[in-house]
Image: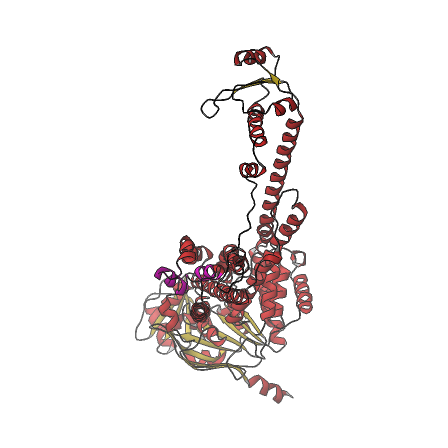
Amino acid sequence: MHNLSTVVRFEITRTLKKKTFWIAALAVPTIAGLVGIIIFFSNKATHDQTESLAKEQYAFGVTDDSHVLSPLLLKAVKAEPVASQAVGEADVKSGKLEAYFYYPKDISKQSVYVYGKEVGLFQDSRYQSLANQLLIQSAQASTSPSIRAILKGDVSYNASTFDSDGTVDKGFLKVIAPGLFLVLFYFMIAMFGNQILTSVTEEKENRVIEMILATIKPTTLLVGKLLSLITLALIQMIVILIPIIIGYLLLHDQLTLPNFDLSQIPIDPMRITLGAVVFFVSFLMYTGLLMTLGAAMPTAKEAGSLFGAAMALLFGPLYAASLFVTSPDATIVKVLSYFPLTAPIPLLLRNAVGNLTVQEASIAILVLLATTIFILSIGVRIFKFGALEYSRKLSLKEILRRKA
Amino acid sequence: MEKAEESIKNTPLVSVDHFEMSFGKTNVIKDLSFTVSKGETFGFLGSNGSGKTTTIRALLGIYQPTGGTLHIDGKPYTVDGTVRLGYLPEERGLYKKEQVIDIMTYFGQLKGMSKDDAKTWSLDYLKRVDLVDKAATRLDKLSGGQQQKIQLGITIMNDPSLLILDEPTKGFDPVNRRLLMDIIEEHQQKGATVIFVTHQMEEVERLCDRILLLKDGEASLYGTIDQVKEQFGNQIIEVVSEKTIPEHPTLYTVSRREGSVTTLEPKSELHAIQKAIINAGITFTRFELKRPSLDDIFVEVYGAKAGKEL
């Protein structure tokens, strides 16, 4: 295609020179980094405070009418036995003790009383915390290790479910690889949708289109813009992902981030292939649709009003996400999966959770492909005939009637 | 040698044959035929809305004709063909948010130049028009006149063999108008073919070898300027008088009044007209028989409609 590489290079270079591109790309990792730093310092401060509180020694007294507390524990923590609640309260008020805890006879029905010297709004809770810890540790000390584990929630489980062929089912891990296409599609449309829509109105608004059309074919310009947008989307994704991955590797321990063992993620070639094909055709179809809408409108502002409608069709099915997972045979699921403008999300989601058959996927892909070809051919016509309509919207009838 | 040059000059570079163009029920061009020879400067004239721009767009393949053929160098124009085109459209503009040098280099590349050549050429041109210090400036930071210079530069990049200028002086300040005329003359001297779409008669008389006047979708007058004046036929009489000269349906018609100057189209002998005016009690300081100017012809062809639009 004559001059295609020149168009692609120009479109990519001029976008990469724009500050807004880098601001948009770097905003995600920057915000993620800032949130990480806040979490890190918050965790550190809490940890430091907990440690300092644990180290802090203060004189406290206990009256245990419940007989639940372990005498050994009370001795170990240097709790001073106090004769009665009234004495303990008086000792705290006079400053003889910093804290005093009264455990009544039946702690299941009566409250435990906690008295303490005021040490600040956020630190006064330490007394109640200690009173509670004394109860928990005493209870644990009086039971078997198993009961202790149950009480502490430390029981570990090793569950296995089996697929129809007898192999161990990988559960949620199976969704990850094919599900990436859904995430990628959502990300690319959300980040680039508006840019795709307005990319074709620029030449019209700047009145440069006539000079361009005397130098290159409209198809070259459209395909050039399409290729450059895809390339820019990939660049932006890399710009977003690299700092996040580096941040994950560097701050994994400090932020106590979860472990990802990539070797555990199952790779199902069929689902990944279907996901890739549905993703590619859907992206092409929506890019073509957005470009066509943009070409039909005289200005970016007017084209923008159609963006909401296109996005409602595309992302509307997300509201029925649970239905796609649980009831793949429901009529509404079938309709949304085969109607081209709503199909991408249902197809990618169903493929991710594994309830999209190869036969269903093949039919849907053919429908998407046919729609894409139709939209792109209409788009080229609209662009060609609408390019010089600086202030007028073309009707579909007019476009179809004109000689190609 | 002269014969060979003449032969090249007579070879049509552009040929439009029975061109028709309709938009819906509107018939913009009914039946238009003309040729433009290599190295010729051709004036394509008409009032606003007469179909000049439509014809040019169809010639460049931007519009598909409803009927007839439009050829450049023997075949329909394609962007990847052999003709080096310089086109300055009526509706003009450039990428506003990009640097001047980037825009010029991009268009140079689209026109077939290498990136380095396009950049070097652009810098030379910017030096010529005193804008070299603006090479790295965003286009929308330049004044309107400076942007016009950039547009002109882009039009003549890669040494076009066919220059199509649609209303080139529209919105141009006098400095840029002068620059444009110099550029056209330079390209004429280099042997380029120039199609000059306009209704500025003064420039047409100065630059064009042949002209075509488009009216109601057809060629109203077509040929060299002399031939057109001849085709137009009637000579005119210019009379300078203090009093208004009345109409006289049998001896003359008044075609124009501008202050004390009245233009008459004679229908009878000069002495009969003179006598009739004197008998009406009007004294004149000038009574001159003239060939009509292109301006007169234009006004005559397009009448009151053109007068209003101009």
- Pick the residue in front: A317 or B147: A317
Magenta span: predominant SS is helix
- Asked if the magenta segment contains residue A329, the reply would be yes
- Whole-percent x, y for residue A140 in the image: 57, 32
In the picture shown, does residue A79 fall above or below B289?
above
Is residue B208 rendered to the left or right of residue A379? right
- Whole-percent x, y for residue B251 in the image: 33, 75
- Asked if the magenta segment contains residue A206, the reply would be no
Is residue A23 rendered to the left or right of residue B216? right
Q: What is the count of numbered marks?
A: 0
What are the residue bounds of the magenta stretch?
A327-351
- For the C terminus of chain B, give its image quadrant: bottom left
Residue A299 can be seen, yes or no: yes
Q: Residue, x 35% and y 63% (percent of image)?
A: B244
- Whole-percent x, y for residue B84 in the image: 59, 76
- Pick the residue in front: A201 or A154: A154
In the picture shown, does residue B189 fall above or below B178?
below
Residue B293 can be seen, yes or no: no
Identify the coloring: secondary structure
